[in-house]
Image (tube, grey):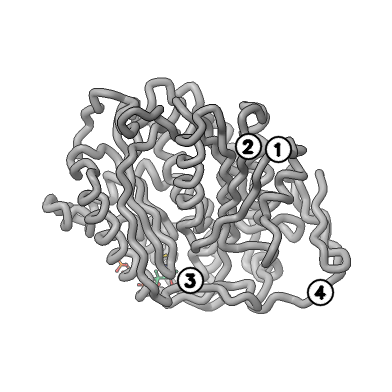
Amino acid sequence: MSTETTENPQAGAAHGTVPSGIQDIAFATGHYSFDLAHLAEKQDIDVNKYYIGIGQETMSLTAEDEDTVTMGAAAAQRIIDRNGTEGIRTLLFATESGIDQSKSAGVYVHGLLNLPREVRTIETKMACYGGIGALQMALGIVARNPEEKVLVIASDVARYDVDTSGEPTQGAAAVAFLVQANPDILAIEPAQGVYTLDVQDFWRPNHRNTALVDGKFSVGAYLDALVGAWNDYRAHGGVGFDDINWFCYHQPFTKMAVKAHVRLTEEAGTPLEKAEAAAALAPTFGYNKQLGNSYTASIFLGFLALLDSDEEIAGQRVGFFSYGSGAVSEFFVGVIQPDYRDHLRAEEHQAILDAREPVDYDQYRALHPGTMVQPLDNYKTQRQTESPFRFEGVDEGSRIYGKS
Ligand code: COA
């Protein structure tokens, strides 16, 4: 992999347009953490199946009074505190663990953050791809009017049934970021490789809290989609494999990214062994190993880990691969901007991880919502979270949110 910088750090703007991309990025997670050692002990298996085999150590769990809205609002609050609201005319909320069939979760966040009324707010959904889909929409809005900014939130609670293969890959987190012209962190190049194929590898019917997944099939579907998106990227003016310095994959579990990188290097004609691929991707794993799968947020947490790592990456190209089961995927590239380090907050991010309250197996089971959505129109949640925002319960079918 090349460690050269590109000649033009804002490379990639389409001819005659202003470069645009990510100006600032922040994350939030659930109140609790659960070490996979407890799960392995209960299942009487070697914990290294999880720590090494799938590359996951702990998962975040949401408190009873947290959900995708409270995590998304907490992440977005950080962006607003640092950047203000000027120029933001669109809020895109990406999630595959939506809390209403009609109303965008983003509208609740809009209310909690007291954002100006002159904002369009919608929710995007396509499994784990929804956040990258929102990013591409945001880039389109900024290309049309470079004065405008878009607040994107990707927030998810990943839940599978207990005693299933997906159980160790649960998790919860939200990422918020600001998309604008002439960004300080990442300028996104115009070439995009896209790929859609109707496959039934992972889905969540309306009556379920938990996703259904054909685990091994989904791994194969991810790898096929990667090859499809990569070849489309190359066919649409994308740079060659050797021109990309870092790769940031969707990480449902971090080992998935290693499998993907091995497959991509084969396709690109420069095959890497598993250990070499793992070493090349290691700077992107730190947060996802601790948070678990966060669906739409996962790829951005991989990127945040790379930014916060010891690597000096100014001027270098990062290749992004997003996969949403079902399946839609995309490959594109961004260039790290010269002053990106001015926006880094590795200590703050570590503090968010450390602030989680560890739980044992019985507490984990008590927090797990079970398979079926409970048809309750009225209930109150207990006060558990220390997040700035709470999900207070349901009143005559309306979800009620408040500040802590
Ligand atoms: N030490 C080290 N590695 C170990 C181990 C041990 N003691 N025991 C097992 N492993 C390894 C296995 O060799 C395997 O490695 P490999 O994938 O490189 O072959 C890995 O751990 C997983 O073991 P496996 O038996 O395949 O696990 P599983 O069948 O229980 O489940 C998934 C694996 C991915 C199918 C499961 O986690 C899942 O369903 N995940 C959710 C779906 C998903 O995220 N899909 C991704 C696309 S979105």
Bin the neighbour count of mark 3 within 10 Å (Cα to Cα): few under 14, some 14-19, many 20 and up: some
Q: Position of residue 172 (x, y in %)?
A: 58, 56
- Circle 1 or circle 4, nearest the eye: 1
- Beta carbon of the mark 3 residue lies under 8 A of ligand 1: yes
Q: Is residue 10 left or right of residue 288?
A: left
Q: Secondary structure at mark 4?
A: loop
Bin the neighbour count of mark 2 within 10 Å (Cα to Cα): few under 14, some 14-19, many 20 and up: some
Q: Which residue is mark 4?
A: 376
Q: Which residue is mark 2?
A: 89
Q: Which residue is mark 3?
A: 166
Residue 198, placed above or below residue 47: below
**Label 3 close to label 1 by CB (< 8 Å):** no
**Label 1 close to label 4 by CB (< 8 Å):** no
**Label 2 close to label 1 by CB (< 8 Å):** yes
Q: Which residue is mark 1?
A: 118
Q: Position of residue 159 (x, y in %)?
A: 58, 67
Viewer-side residue, 250 vs 327: 327
Please indicate, yes or no, whether residue 54 appears anywhere in the rendered image: yes
- Circle 4 or circle 3, nearest the eye: 4
Image quarter of the C terminus: top right
Q: Amino acid at mark 4?
A: Leu
Q: Is residue 231 left or right of residue 219?
A: left
Marks 4 and 3 sit apart, C-alpha to C-alpha, by 27 Å
